[in-house]
Each structure stands twice: as structure tokens, then as C-alpha cells.
Image (tube, helix red, strand yellow):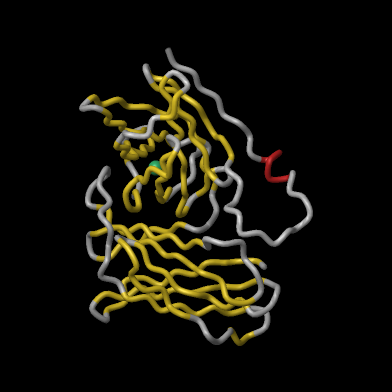
Amino acid sequence: MRRFSLVSSLLALAACGPEVVTQQPPARLVLATTSVAPFDAELASTASLGTGLTTVWLTLKDHGQPVTDAAVTLQPLMTMPTKSHACPVVGDVVHEGNGVYRGQLVFQMPSADMGTWSLSAKVVRGGVESKLTFDALAVGDSGLARSFVVGDAKYVMSVSYPEALKVGLNPVVVTLHRMQDMMTFPAFDDATLEMVPEMPAHGPGSSNNVAPTLKGPGRYEGVVNYSMLGDWKTTFTVKSTSAVMATVSIDTKL
Ligand SMILES: [Cu+2]
């Protein structure tokens, strides 16, 4: 038996109340559900899915009871007319407790007429392997993922802000993965990043920026100073052994 549903995120996003300063993590939005005996599974994210670094939560239940002892692996897949490909998965899936598993991945392209995304979770429990698949996921274009080619190798890069943006210092996360083949995207840990934020309308940028440095497999963390409201353009220069691999600019509005 298999159930499936997609919930529009727009209503949830529009339902924000007055701004309150809070340390609570952002609310999770249930995107889809599926069942493969003995599991009922729910897929959630902090918002509708978009290109770039995305955190997903998988809630696993077995006859209503949280499944706390499974090993979970994420297997994203985009099906296109003539080929299929995966996308980078960042780090391991972690059991947060109470049957909730958290993972991160980088969608490098939006779903469209030419291709649809699905996300499977390989669940291993007591030596038994199950595969739970969430089909036809809507992935919008956030402008936060880029691909570039160096020699004959293709790379996938993402830029994201783990906290709500504010005027001043903001944590920024960059991910880098090399496309080994259509299904394999190992972390690329050999990059050095330069980061320059500027306001194209005003000229000069800001000070006290900390260029992202490697903090985990394929994961670079830094601090960007968006020192006033308005439109920012942040340019990342990706280098490896001092050779420039790519220059990537991301537009951000505060
Ligand atoms: Cu594709």
C-alpha cells in the first residue's frame, strides 16, 4: 500500500505572525507522506523545496510507534527524458530522537517540464532494508545553487544562510561537491574561498567579513556582513591550489 500527498507551502509561508525574536528553529512543513510496510513516513523541510542546501526531516513510524533504531541514507533522483541523475547529499543522516531523522542535500536544478525530483530514503533496520520514495517533489529555483566546469570535471556549489537574514553579521554556508558521475557527488574539500559582498547601487561593500572555510565534508562556513538594507551581490571566488576554479555571484535582498 502506498499513500502520497503534496501540501502547498504557500499558505504556511503567508501565515507568518508578527516578528518575534526567538531561538526556536524554523517551523517544519510536511511536504509528502508515503508508506511501505511496516513504515509510515513523512517528509518535511523548513519551507517548500528549492535549489541549494536543503534540510529535510524524515519521520518514521511503525504501527504508530517512532522508529528510533534505523540507519537512513538519502537517495535523491532527478528523472529527465534521456537520463537520470542524483544530487549532492551533505553529511550523514542523523537521528534527532523520537523517530525523526535529519539530512541535508543540495538540489542543483529545479524541477520543471524536463525533469522531476524524487527523494528516496534507504532504511536499514534489524538487517532488513526498505526503500521509501517520495515522488514528484516540487523544487523551485532559489538562485542559490550553481554548477561550474573545471577541465572535464563538473562541480555543484550552493550558498545558504542558516539563520534568518538581518542587517549586520550573518552566518553563511557554502557547499562544494564534484560530480564524479551522474549518481555520485563526493564532497570537494580542497577549495579556498574568497567572499566579497557589495551593494551594486551604492558601490562599497562591508567590513568584518569572514570568508567561509572548511568545517565538514564539502561544507564551508563563514560570516557575511550585510551592513544595511537593500540589494546585495556577494561574489565568491573558488580557488584550488591558488588557481581560480570559478567566480560565483549570489544576489540577496535584505
Ligand atoms: Cu536534471
User: Viewed as shown, does residue 200 lie left or right of 116?
Assistant: right
Return the residue nearer the eye: 203 or 20.
Answer: 20
Write the residue at 57% across / 43% down. 28
Question: In which of the image's four quarters is ligand 1 placed?
Answer: top left
Query: Residue 100: image x %, image y %?
Result: 44, 38
Quadrant location of the N terminus? top left
User: Viewed as shown, does residue 127 lie left or right of 215?
Assistant: left
Farthest right residue in view: 18
Write the residue at 23% across / 47% down. 181
Return the residue nearer the eye: 209 or 118.
Answer: 209
Quadrant location of the C terminus? bottom right
Return the residue nearer the eye: 175 or 111.
Answer: 175
Query: Residue 67: image x %, image y %?
Result: 39, 30
Q: Residue 231 sits in which quadrant? A: bottom right
Query: Residue 188: image x %, image y %?
Result: 27, 62
Return the residue nearer the eye: 144 or 105.
Answer: 105
Q: Residue 193 sits in which quadrant? A: bottom left
In the displayed structure, 50 sits above or below 125; it is below
Write the residue at 25% across / 26% down. 129
Write the residue at 32% across / 41% down. 85
User: Viewed as shown, does residue 252 lie left or right of 145?
Assistant: right
User: Viewed as shown, does residue 179 lie left or right of 15?
Assistant: left
